[in-house]
């Protein structure tokens, strides 16, 4: 990994480059942490969505979690085997499956939350709490603006 000091000033001065580098580092940390826990980021996304929004079809989970349909199916299969989710046919449309988080899935989500909280602490360790919150607020404003196509002010 190239350090900021070794990067041409033209690049290092660009927020887009800095965001990309920070995102890549965050992804490496999260992937390693989930791997140590015997999980993948997709597992966390699905469990978090089910916990927050309730029962969902596989298609809804794909949209909410920004996942490809085949990745959703594979992750749900992996989560169903140890009993973290339950998949049942939708009574209104037998071609669709409804996915529900189980009590074991809620426990698994708590474990993964702790792992991801540690990643956040490691990633943001150079920043005091106030700066961490400011960073989160600024990134949220950027993403919200671009997702809605509206002026963030």
Image (cartoon, rainbow, N blue to C red):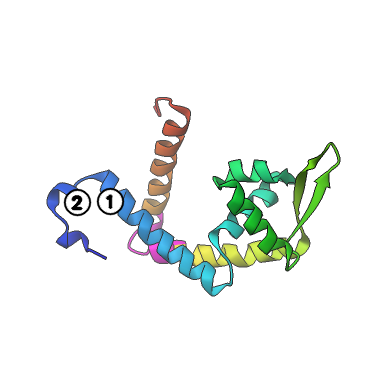
Q: Where is residue 118 in the image (x, y as percent from the top left)?
A: 49, 67
Q: Is residue 8 left or right of residue 20?
A: left
Residue under circle 1? 18
| x 42%, y 37%: residue | 141
Q: Closer to the camera, 120 or 130?
A: 120
Q: How far apart are marks 1 and 2 (CA)?
A: 7 Å
**Stretch of the chain drawn in magenta:** 120-129
Give the secondary structure at mark 2.
helix
Q: Where is residue 151 in the image (x, y as percent from the top left)?
A: 39, 25
Residue 124 in sight in this render: no
Between discs 1 and 2, the one toward the N terminus: 2
Q: In this view, does 9 lie to the left or right of 126?
A: left
Estimate how packed mark 2 is, as few (under 14), some (14 to 19) or many (20 or more) residues with alpha carbons within 10 Å.
some
Q: In this view, does 81 lie to the left or right of 37?
A: right
Residue 98: in magenta span: no
Q: In which quarter of the image is residue 96?
A: top right
Residue under circle 2? 12
Q: Is residue 106 left or right of residue 7?
A: right
């Amino acid at each position: 990994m190239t350090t900021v000091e070794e990067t041409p000033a033209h690049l290092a001065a660009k927020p887009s480059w800095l965001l990309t580098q920070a995102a890549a580092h965050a992804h490496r940390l999260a992937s390693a942490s989930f791997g140590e826990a015997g999980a993948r980021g997709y597992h966390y996304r699905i469990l978090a969505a089910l916990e927050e929004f309730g029962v969902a079809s596989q298609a809804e989970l794909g949209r909410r979690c920004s996942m490809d349909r085949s990745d959703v199916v594979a992750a749900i299969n992996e989560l169903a085997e140890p009993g973290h989710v339950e998949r049942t046919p939708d009574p209104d449309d037998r071609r669709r499956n409804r996915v529900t988080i189980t009590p074991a899935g809620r426990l698994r989500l708590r474990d993964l939350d702790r792992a991801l909280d540690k990643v956040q602490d490691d990633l943001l360790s150079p920043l005091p709490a106030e700066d961490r919150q400011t960073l989160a607020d600024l990134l949220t404003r950027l993403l919200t603006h671009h997702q809605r196509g509206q002026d963030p002010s």
